[in-house]
Structures are given as structure tokens and as C-alpha cells.
Amino acid sequence: MRGCVTDDFAPEGPLAKAIPGFKPRAAQQEMAQAVSRAIRRKEELVVEAGTGTGKTYAYLVPALRAGTKVIISTGSKALQDQLYSRDLPTVTTAIAYSGKVAILKGRSNYLCLERLEQQSMTGGELAGQMLTEMVSLHGWSHQTLDGDISNCSEVPEDSMVWPLVTSTNDNCLGSDCPQYKDCFVVKARRRAMDADLVVVNHHLFLADLVVKETGFGELIPDAQVMIFDEAHQLPDIASQYFGQQLSSRQLMDLAKDITIAYRTEVRDMAQLQKSADRLSQSAQDFRLALGDPGFRGNLRDVLEQQPVQRALVLLDDALELCYDVIKMSLGRSALLDAAFERATLYRNRLKRLRDVSVPGYSYWYECSARHFVLALTPLTVADKFLEVMKEKPGAWIFTSATLAVNDDVSHFTSRLGLDEAKSLLLPSPFDFQHQALLCVPRYLPSPNQPGGARQLARMLRPVIEANRGRCFFLCTSHAMMRELAEEFRATMTLPVLVQGETSKSRLLAEFIAAGDALLVATGSFWEGVDVRGDALSCVIIDKLPFTAPDDPLLKARIDDCRLRGGDPFNDVQLPEAVITLKQGVGRLIRDTSDRGVVIICDNRLVMRPYGGVFLNSLPPAPRTRDLQQAIRFLKQAP
């Protein structure tokens, strides 16, 4: 470890000299010292650092001073970009760091030149907006240096064009690709191989360690320091990668690629088109057999239904037909050869998913209006994650603003098997006594009662109007979000923005630009959203965010907990709801000058014994049950 980390954070230190407005913070220095010590001793460290601690700098400085290869993994691509584009340049300049840094994302975040060319060759199928966007992409492909699609301003991030011109681990041709030497993924990987510090995300990190399909595996053995920011997401993401999934999108993409190969390279094999059409149709038929969209169901139960069984047999037959037809043309097309491997992989995966008798897993499915996912997820990843860590000796550091429940991080550490980890809890430096107010209103409608959303909207409309919008209404279900939004739009003149009506980044930009908007949202706005200043001064939460009791993954974990002699409510359901609530509440106060009210519309906070666990885990703001007091607080000048 070169230099003294504490000196970097001193009043006259490098950070203070190089960063306008930088002020030394005791908690930040304490965290930096703990991270530095863990790196030096090659230990496991878990740090909950409350909002405003400055945790990013607290781990970046020791990481850059480590003199060894470091991987920093974030929970979201948004934080990954922020870390690489904003925070890293600031800190590397401040401490005169001379090493190399790089960013690496999953394959589907980079433009695939081969798939772009294939789309152009098949042509004629795209119309209107998509055709315009494809033309724009051709121009951008000649200008971009890194091919990172988040840097392409000409095409919206939620455009339907992106899946057509990016590759996945399943459909990438690898070194057989005609465009391999110009491949943006290959170039990004080389930069990462050559770098001293690499910024990745949890999905990529785990996909590499577990699936070994990203071509990123050669990077990780070189790293002696692994740092996970937004670490509270890690157990759930790890569960995905230690399990298996098959989706209609994968099957439809396979059918599309068979069609492209037939139209461009193997035109004498008409059976290819027939097999692709049959696979596509069978996937759509299976989706319809699963029933209503919009929820997660138990795969064991649904596979007992005769219509679903029949549709699954036809889907399996369609995959087998693709396998047999492609086999006759092997060696004639790199695209078709890759499709053959995928057909083999998907058949094996489908076979594994149908065998719902293997213990230790939750079997579930999810369906939207047009797509489905079939999945099995291990009930615990602790043993497997521990194996991964033992294979990569070094420092393993986990940090987030929300890891503890009642000042205890054991729920998080037990899920990942971090029995030997040292822990550090650093409270937020914000003055919640003066900056915030927590309100649990009286006379709330009972949860799930008919007309409850309308009653809640009427009750809270005066608060939202008194605050001139500038409010997030965070919901625990899509149904509640839609009902509330409908009621607010019918009764208020303020702009009402709703999650799902456009991309997350565009919604956020519209919310800030409006200056008087109400944003009604679910899951994706509970975390990873940073709105500072007057633009957001009220956060309303419809109820405590317990996972729905009929969720098959939760049900399976509850049964497993019971079998182990545990208490499912206190060991599984309560801690996860507390962590989620902390994330939602954390959207409000993001800076020392922020001020506002959090309203939680759930009597259980004050009526049930476990309400104390939630309250003790939240920031220490004054509390009230009077909405009029909340309105007065919002109207007071700071």
C-alpha cells in the first residue's frame, strides 16, 4: 500500500486541494482506513455507509493506492458509468494516479457490427421509426470509438432496434465472427486486461464466475481486490446466476437468427425457415397457455395443467426440429453453427426446468403480455458464493447504504456465507432532526380494500398540491401504481408521470425539468435514483414493501427456513422488507441542504411489534401522524 490513506482525506490533503467544496468527514476517513486495512490483510469487510458518508471516495482512494489489480463491481450500469466517467477521473487527478483504468460491461451493451450488417442485408422488414433509427446507427457505427450504446444519443435507450444490433452470450459468434478484429467487446476486454483497475457490474462479475461464458474469466484471477458497491443487491443477483433460466426472448432470437442465416447464406434450405417459424409460433403458444400476464407463479403447479403440458411438448418438439434441420447444414454458416449450439443448450435447459423434483431450488415462471421466463433458483447461495471466494484469494469488500437491519448486518452476511467478514456501520452525517420529517398518517384505508387507492389519493392530494408536486409516490405493486396515477390525473392539474410510459432516464429528466411533477413508480425508482435539492422534497410510500406472500421464490425460501429450524418471518421476510424500505426512504435526503417529508401509508409501522424494527432501521427523523404537520413542515422556509 503506497502512501497514507488518511493523509489523502486531510484538510490540506490532495482531495481537498483538487476538489472544490471537499470537506473532511470523519466517517469517510474511518471507512477509507478500514478498506485500506482489509486490502493490506486480504480480508473480508462489510461496510454500511449511510447516504452522505462519501463511500465512493472512501473505497476508491485505497483501491487506487493498493498497487495491485482491483475490480470494482456496481449494482447498476448507471452507477458504473458515473463511477467511471465522473468519480474516477476526479480522484485519479487528485492523487496523481498513474495506473490504467477501464470499464467493462456485458456484451449486450456494445454495438455488434456483424448483427448490424446482417440486419442491413435482410432489410425490408423494418418500417417507420425503427428504419430511421437503423440509418442513424449506421452513421454512429463509423464514429464511435468504444461502441458503448449508452453513448449513442441518436437512438433512445428503450428502442426496439437495440436487441437487433447487439449480441448476447448465446448468439455471439466469438472468434468465428467475420468482424472479430473490429469487435467492440473484444477491444473493451483487451483494455480491461491491460488495466490496473476495472469497473464492472454485479451481473457481469457473476456471469463470468458462474457461467464462464463472458470471455472475461481471464481477468478475475489477476485481481487481488474485489469491491462491491450497492452490495445489498448481490445475494439476489447471485441467485439468478447459480440457477437456470430459459426465456421466450432467447427462443425468438434463435428463430430470428435461423431466418437470417437462411436468407443470407443457406438459401437452398427452406426447412430452416419452416423450423424457425414453428419455434417462434410454439413460443407464442406456450406464452398464451401460461395464462394472465404480470405476475410470478409456481412452475411446479403450472406444469401440472394439461394445456401447459401440451404446449411445452410442442415447444420441445419445435426446438428438436430446429436442432435436426440445422444439423444438416453445419459448417456452411458461422451464424447457423452458433444457432446449433444454442438449440442444444436450450433443449438441455428445458429438460432441467421440467424436472421440478430436484430439492433445494425454487421453480418459478414469469410472464408479461408477450414474453415468459422459466426459471429455477437455488434457495441459498452461501455455500456456492463461498467457494467462488476461496478460488479467488484476496480482499473482498462489500458496501452499501442499506445492509443493516436493526444495526446488524448478519442477514446480509449469512446470505453470502461471509461468516469471517469484519463489519463497520457508519451512520449518515445528515441532520435528519432538522432536514426531514417522517409521517405515518392516521385514518389510512386498510391494505387491499376495494377503492383503497382512490381513498389514499384523495387523502394525500392536499400534501402533494401544497408541495407543488416535487414528489415521488413509490408503490409496492403495478396495480396500485396504475390506480393511483389514474386517480391523480383525474383530480389534479399538476403533471403526473408514471413509470413504464417512457424510459427511466427520460422520466427522471422530465420530472426534474417540470419542477412541479408527481412521479408514480414501482420497483426501479426505489433505489439508484439521485435527485438533489428542491426538485424532490416529498417521498410517499404506499405500504411496507413485503414481498407478495404468493411469490414462489419467497414461498420456497420460507419452507427452507422452516426446515432449518429458523423463523421465516424474522429471518427472511422482515429483513428484506426493511432493506427495501430503507432504499425507498433514502431517495429523499441526498445532500446537506436537502429538506423534506417521507410519508409511509401503513399503520403496521406503529401498530405491530415489528414496526419498531423498521423504525429503528430508518434515519432518526422526527415523527408525526398528522398530515397537516407534514404540510406545515413542507411550507417552512429552510
Image: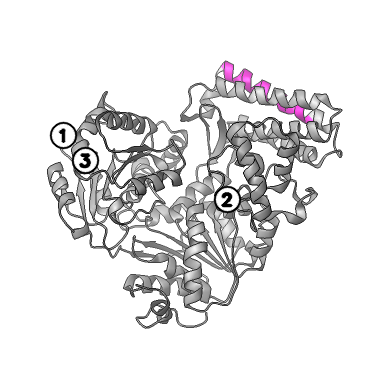
- Magenta span: helix, strand or loop, mainly? helix
Q: Which residue is mark 1?
A: 443
Label 1 with label 3: CB-CB less than 8 Å: no
Front residue of 71 and 146: 146
Q: Which residues are magenta?
A: 306-323
Indicate which label's residue lies in the foreground, 1 or 2.
2
Residue 258 location (% of width, % of height): 75, 32
Camera-nearest residue between 286 and 628: 628
Disc 3 to disc 2, how far (Cα)? 38 Å
Q: CA distance from mark 1 to mark 2?
A: 49 Å
Q: Mark 1 falls on what kind of element?
A: loop
| Left or right: 467 as drawn, with respect to 413 | left
How far across and down, in percent of the image, does residue 518 sit?
30, 41
- For mark 2, what is the residue? 152
Task: Look at the image and say whether residue 317 sits in the magenta stretch.
Answer: yes
Q: CA distance from mark 1 to mark 3?
A: 20 Å
Give the image location of residue 527, x and y in percent: 39, 49
Q: Which residue is mark 3?
A: 465
Q: Who's the residue at 43% across and 53% down the image?
A: 232
